[in-house]
Image (tube, rainbow, N blue to C red):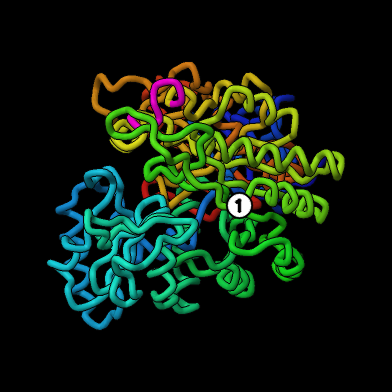
Amino acid sequence: MSPTADLVLTGGPVHTVDPSRSRATSVAVRDGRIVAVGHDEVRELIGPRTEVVDLKGKSLLPGFQDAHVHPQGAGLELGLCHLADTVDPAEYLRRIREYADRNPDVEWITGGGWSLEAFPGGAPTAEALDAIVPDRPVFLPNRDHHGAWVNSRALERAGIDARTPDPADGRIERDADGNPTGMLQEGAVHLVGKLVPDPTPEDQLAALLRAQAVLHSYGVTAWQDAIVGAYANMADPAPSYLAALDQGLLTARVVGALWWDRERGAEQIPELLARREELHRDRFRSCTVKVMQDGIAENHTAAMLTPYLTGCGCSSDNSGISFVEPGELKKYVTELDASGFQVHFHALGDRAVREALDAVESARTANGWRDTRHHLAHLQVVHPHDVPRFRALGASANLQMLWAAHEPQMDELTLPFLGAERGARQYPFGDLLRAGATLAAGSDWPVSSPDPFQAIHVAVNRVSPGAPEGTPEFLPGQRLDLGTALAAYTAGSAHVNHLDDITGSITVGKSADLVVLDRDPFAGPPEEIAATRVLETFVEGRRVHTADDA
């Protein structure tokens, strides 16, 4: 007779994300591994010491994997002046004033999470901050961390005035006389951000653990940290991961994407190799390099093949910024690939996507086919000629599904400046799937919600959860079916993370990284997907989250 199981989950639909057996009703776990998947026969493994979880018709999924997230930064923002979850400028000012009053001894007022759509042109002013915090510098990155709102005291500390030139990779917003107005874009953020005191190691560890708890509450059991290294005002999270490991507190599996310093060249590759060796421990390893190739569409720094339109619909002289010169990018990616690194690209505009794919192609040509699993994140605008190249080059499409919907940032700050033809090429999830691309998924939290079901809802419906009745679907021909969207957030991200041998599906022999839901999302209408909640999360068969009402 087979040894009994440590844990059996039974009595509900099991969505295995395993093509050889897509549905079951029972799963058995022993020593952190799945030992049986099936139906009533699995109950034979129940012994006197077996914990039995009666699903009572609720569903079981493999743990979600977030392929692009910034946990430490998100955790820090939650503990500072937190501006997310509203788009009301008056509410922002109220929270900032309240935070400043509550922390009279804090030298800098910082935090972030505000939305571009809250302000005309996406550009708030120093004047508004000066009225409530005139005596201390204020530095507040926006939701996407490609810009920052600062007050006059912060500009003075950084020595920024009308004579200060824009950095090559950014822009200082100015009035008609050339005076800074209080909004910094891209590389200009660092002019002030570098002056903000780093959080203490204790604060950083607390932030990481706070974020881990949030991610587990949404069923996320593994992730790829999209920036490991110091970037702008974001502290390097690597020491926090090592401290969490040393203290036995890291319960997730994490791949760290080492930051590529775009102000340097190939001379940094030996340093990255040394960091890869240093940061290869148990549940945390850094075998990936993050290259940010462009900015974002809303501030016109995403790299486009043709210029943005102006407010009157005319062609401008601005096609965005390629942060790494394309010819050099090919050389760097080829060398990184030869060294066994995966490259994780931020590629949002169609020119950046093409430049990233060209670099992958150069690496494949020079090095042959290697199991490096390069992936491109964001993919807001993709030229149709480049869609089939993902499969041809083995480059995965790392989707931020939540963004593919009509909302003010899209309708007011993006579509008018892209034009109809280019605007219709946004977030082409369906085209990528039909072309045979491997799909992965990530949240980019704190840029947007870490809840996979919020994102999956948009992928299936192409409408934001809670959108007003009558909101049109956003390019509905690019929708995904529910099974495909779930697979991207589980097996697809496990593939990108090189964890597909042990995670990503409910399969005998794999780790028992599991999520219990409050319903079967396949059984209800698509319009209710976002209401799905996680009741329990397991990593290696051990509970790491239980909802209060589970």
Answer with left or right where residue 109 lies relative to residue 36.
left
- In the image as oriented, which residue stretches furthest toward the bottom? 105
Residue at position x 41%, y 43% from top?
A: 300
Say what amino acid the circle numbered 1 marks. Val
Look at the image and tell me whether residue 280 can be seen.
no
Membership of 210 in magenta stretch: no
Q: Is most of the magenta stretch helix, strand or loop?
A: helix
On screen, residue 473 above or below 225: above
Quadrant occupied by the N terminus = top right
- Front residue of 224/210: it is 224
- Front residue of 31/142: it is 142
On screen, residue 62 above or below 161: above
Q: What residue span does the magenta drawing correspond to?
A: 416-422
x and y, in percent, of residue 144 in the image: 41, 50
Residue annotated with mark 1:
324
Q: Residues within 10 Å of mark 1 (few under 14, many from 20)?
A: many
Quadrant occupied by the C terminus = top left
**Numbered disc 1: secondary structure:** loop
